[in-house]
Image (spheres, rainbow, N blue to C red):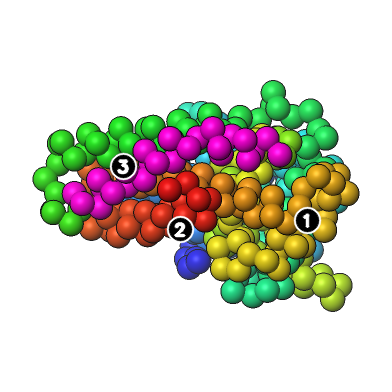
Amino acid sequence: MSRHTIKATTTADLMAHPAVKAWRKLAPGKLLPEGVAVVTERSDKGKRTRKSEVYQLDGVGIGTSPVIAKRCQRSTAMIERIIYEEVLEHLPVTVPHYYGCVEDVDGFFWLFIEDVGDRAFSPLQAEHRRVAARWLGVTHTLASRMEMMARLPARGLDYYLGHLRLARHIIQQSLETFTLSCDDIELLRCVVSQLDIVEAHWTELEACCREVPWTLIHGDFSPKNVRVREDSGRMVLLPFDWETGGWGVPVVDLAQFVRQSIAPEISDYVSIVRECWPHLRIEMIQSLANTGRIFRSISSIGWEAQSLSSTWVTRTMNNMQEYSDMLDVAICAARLK
């Protein structure tokens, strides 16, 4: 992820930056950052068109480490705040250091967390997948004992069924409204057919998900939202960006790290969760992971469908093809055809 450092010519310029002003509300008296790097910023016209803006504040964290400042909508900020303060804080898992949350204006908030660096998680590396499996196993089992259902968004099957129906509705409207190529029309009709197949087998997916209790889920447990690093000679996992997190069935998180190779990481996950969920076998976890892949594909299709009316329709259709292929594999693995 590229970052562009803003050069402040004077202390006053640096203090005027909105991320720095929010940080000083959270930690009055702290040193000013040495610089501010843009991770995700507003549009060129200066309008805040994104749901969030992310900056790196240099030299203000523990041991003069950098801090990530994320400006986001209240709904997003409250989810992440609860997860960092009331759930992860009480679990024996590695997480980025959470500095706090500050209210901004116009319904926005600032979240401040440790900058976990740029060492990316790679699903091609077996050790990375094993570390992810163990991290999820501990988090899923221990968090399931917490009383957080009323505090976090529900991420049960109704949530994903809603995504399915909305995605299908948007696609069907697009087929009637927009001028599309023959290939695009064929692909979108294929996606609608896939969604129909999944909904027709929804009771089977529900039965599979009854095997595990509801717990904390990340919701977007993918390489872009995870970093790894060495700590006292061992590799540790550091997930962040919990804005799609909630309380629900943990199958979507499983799907994020089983896409390359299933057996090794599933074994590690089972080795952790069987102490709390002794009825779960490897075959059952594999079925849950397949179900999670279906849910993940549905969510991705739903988000992409909202871009069908944009000028970037070629990129949208390329992504739609990828998600359709992923859903087809998941449907076959779950034997829904």
Please, which residue is most extreme toward the top here? Answer: 150
Q: Secondary structure at mark 1?
A: helix
Q: What residue is shown with label 2?
A: 329
Q: Does residue 200 show up magenta in the picture?
A: yes
Q: Residue at x 59, y 74 (%)?
A: 124
- Residue 255, image x and y in percent? 59, 54
Q: What residue is shown with label 3?
A: 192
CB under 8 Å between discs 2 and 3: no
Quadrant in the picture for residue 244: top right
- Residue range corresponding to the magenta coloring: 185-211
Say left or right for 20 vs 9. Answer: right
Which comes before the other along the chain, label 3 or label 1? 3
Viewer-closest of 160 and 193: 193
Say left or right for 246 vs 159. Answer: right
Disc 3 residue type? Val
Q: Does residue 22 show up magenta in the picture?
A: no
Separation of residues labelled 1 and 2 (CA atoms): 23 Å
Which comes before the other along the chain, label 1 or label 2? 1
Say left or right for 155 vs 52. Answer: right
Q: Which mark is residue 270?
A: 1
Separation of residues labelled 3 and 1 (CA atoms): 35 Å
CB under 8 Å between discs 3 and 1: no
Disc 1 residue type? Val
Disc 2 residue type? Val
Which comes before the other along the chain, label 2 or label 3? 3
Kindly report the secondary structure that dominates the magenta region of the rendered protein. helix
